[in-house]
Image (cartoon, rainbow, N blue to C red):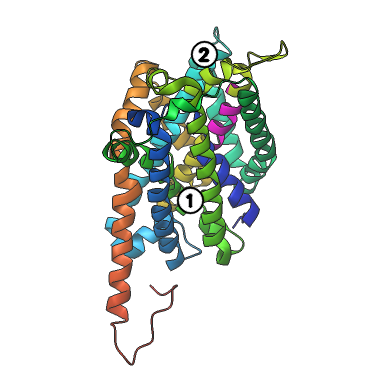
Amino acid sequence: MERISNYQIAVMIILFQIGSTPLFAIGSKAKQDSWVAMIVAAIIGLILLRMFLYIQSIAPDQSLIFLMRICFGKIAGGILSCCFLIYFAYESMRNVRDFGEITSVTLLTRTPKFVVMLLVILLAAYTIIMGIETFCRVAESLILPILFSYSILCLLIFGSKLVKLERIQPIMEKGFKPILTAAFPDLVSFPFGQMVVFLMFWHLMSDNNKVKRISTFTYLGVAVFLVGMNMINVLVLGPSLIGNSTLPFLQTVQLIQVGDIFERLDVFVTLLLFLGLFVKLTAFFWAASYGVSQLTGCRAKVSIGIVGAVIFASSFLEPNYTYHIWLGLAVSVKLFPIFQILLPLAMFIAILFRKLKKHPPSEDTPAPRENAC
């Protein structure tokens, strides 16, 4: 079995969480308090992350597929695992469609979308066929350029004097309810709840003893970054403009003008978003195809081909990009908590029940070990 290092899992979490998150106007329902809603969602996401990690600790060397069987039995666990794989494939499909639409709008305006989408799905499939270690090494090679580029863009935004502090004031003008409404389920579902996919990755770590610490601290670092990016968008564009913008960060970067040298950097930020999208869609693609292989026993290349074909074909079901955005940010995020919250919570309860049944509380009975099932 292939293994991934502690550093590689940290890199994967960073790039996965960043992904396409800066691309969209998430949390815009809270107006100037969208960054506060982001903080609330990040805290809820941290609670979910700790629950995911506890579930993984029951069988550190097993993926979500086997964990479902432990909690719900072979038949029910198998059915629910299939539902999870459909969810992973759907998430990957959404990123493939984002890739095609953004490319058509910003870079290759005369290139058919299906060509771009076919190329990216083939590239992702090739990466997966080469193995999880290769995929993680690709992520390793991207992490420093991506973080450095975002840092430079933020400096240029502040250098262009685009930031106006009054645009985030007054804070909590309408109380906490709009913030909570914006945070749950929308911001929890995207991007923080998507960490559930790492139940397919954590068992591959070479040192399972450090999975909790590495995942938690990495998550917190990315959460701070995403809150900062959300705040920058509000400080530059203002809550009203963000609410009417499809791609607010791209619009923010288009306003950069430092002297007569640094301007029109929208193509540059588009490339950054492409890299994030590729990592995210490939991670979901890998989780779906790897899960199919585990469930059916078929060869990895066969499952990759089947899942890749389904993802590519289903990416054309949405008639246009407006419908795609509406379906993702208004409908899908309301259903994702089934896989990100409800089913993991059911697993958590099942694990506690099994522990209690196997080790009933008693003065003469020591506390159950963490890895007991």
39 to 325, vertically: above or below: below
Element under disc 1: helix
Task: Give the x, y percent position of residue 56.
Answer: 44, 61
In the rendered structure, the answer to whether residue 194 lies left or right of residue 270 reads: left
Near-viewer residue (236 or 95): 236
Task: Give the x, y percent position of residue 253.
Answer: 57, 20
| Pointer 1 with pointer 2, Cβ within 8 A | no
Which residue sits furthest right?
261
Amino acid type at image mark 1: Phe
Which numbered marker is on residue 297? none
In the rendered structure, the answer to whether residue 164 lies left or right of residue 359 reads: right
Which residue range is magenta in the image? 270-279
Whether residue 278 appears in magenta in the rendering, the answer is yes
C-alpha separation, residue under disc 1 versus residue under disc 2: 31 Å
235 to 294, vertically: above or below: above
Category of crowding for the residue at label 1, using alpha-carbon neighbours closer than 10 angstroms: few (below 14), some (14–19), many (at least 20): many
Whether residue 63 appears in magenta in the rendering, the answer is no
Label located before the other in sequence (1 or 2): 2
Q: Which residue is identified by label 1?
A: 198
Amino acid type at image mark 2: Ser
Q: Which residue: 46% across, 57% down?
A: 63
Quarter-of-image position of residue 68: bottom left
Which numbered marker is on residue 104? 2
Quadrant placement of the N terminus: bottom right
Prevailing SS of the magenta stretch: helix
Asked if residue 282 shows in the view, the reply is no
Quarter-of-image position of residue 206: bottom right
Quarter-of-image position of residue 337: top left
Element under disc 2: helix
